[in-house]
C-alpha cells in the first residue's frame, strides 16, 4: 500500500553524497509538516553510533541510512549501508501507519542498501544487533 507521499530530490542527492563521496556517516529522513513529502531531517559525519541513536526520537517515526564499517574475521574491513525504519512503540498510531505506507517510496529510491533494520525499541537498533545482522553474509 502506498500513501502517495513523494521523496524530495534532495534525499537522493544527500544519499549519493553519503554512499559515493563518504561526506556523511548517516542521514535521518522524516516527513514534511504536511506529511506529503519525505525530506532530509539531519546529516552527520559523527563516527559515534550513540550520536546516531540519539537522533532517532523516542516517540516519533523516522527512516535513516547509516554507513556501517566493521572488521570481519578473515575478510578484513567491510562497509554496509544500513536502512533503518524507526517506528518506536511510543509513536502515535496514525504516524506509524503513514510511515509504514510511505517507506517503500524512499527505500526503492535508495539504490545500494545492503541491510534493512526495523526498529520499535532501542534493543532492535543497538550497535551489536545491527553489526550481527550486517556481518552475516558480509
Image (tube, rainbow, N blue to C red):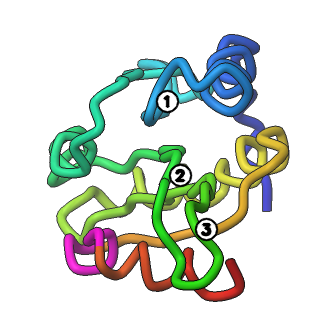
Q: Secondary structure at mark 1?
A: strand
Image-quadrant location for residue 122 = bottom left
Is the residue marked by circle 2 packed among few (<14), some (14-19), or many (20+) residues within 10 Å?
many
Q: Quadrant of the C terminus?
A: bottom right
Location of residue 13 with respect to 96 vertically, above or below: above
CB under 8 Å between callouts 1 and 3? no
Q: Which residue is mark 1?
A: 31
Residues drawn in magenta? 121-127
Q: Split into 4 quadrants, where in the image is the N terminus?
A: bottom right
Q: Earlier in the sequence, mark 3 or mark 2?
A: 2
Task: From the image, give the main secondary structure of the stretch colored magenta.
Answer: helix
Q: Is residue 51 above or below residue 68?
A: above
For label 2, the SS is helix
Horizontal arrangement in the rendering, residue 10 relative to residue 111 (left or right):
left
Q: Is residue 118 shown left or right of residue 126?
A: right
Q: Which residue is mark 2?
A: 99
Residue bearing mark 3? 116
Amino acid at each position: 500500500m502506498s500513501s502517495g507521499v513523494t521523496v524530495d530530490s534532495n534525499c537522493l542527492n544527500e544519499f549519493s553524497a553519503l554512499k559515493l563521496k563518504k561526506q556523511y556517516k548517516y542521514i535521518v529522513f522524516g516527513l514534511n509538516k504536511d506529511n506529503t513529502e519525505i525530506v532530509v531531517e539531519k546529516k552527520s559525519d559523527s563516527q559515534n553510533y550513540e550520536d546516531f541513536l540519539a537522533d532517532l526520537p523516542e516517540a516519533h517515526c523516522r527512516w535513516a541510512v547509516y554507513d556501517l564499517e566493521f572488521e570481519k574475521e578473515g575478510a578484513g574491513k567491510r562497509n554496509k549501508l544500513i536502512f533503518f525504519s524507526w517506528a518506536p512503540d511510543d509513536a502515535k498510531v496514525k504516524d506509524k501507519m503513514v510511515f509504514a505506507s510511505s517507506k517503500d517510496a524512499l527505500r526503492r529510491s535508495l539504490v545500494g542498501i545492503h541491510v534493512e533494520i526495523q526498529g520499535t525499541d532501542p534493543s532492535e537498533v543497538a550497535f551489536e544487533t545491527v553489526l550481527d545482522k550486517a556481518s552475516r553474509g558480509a
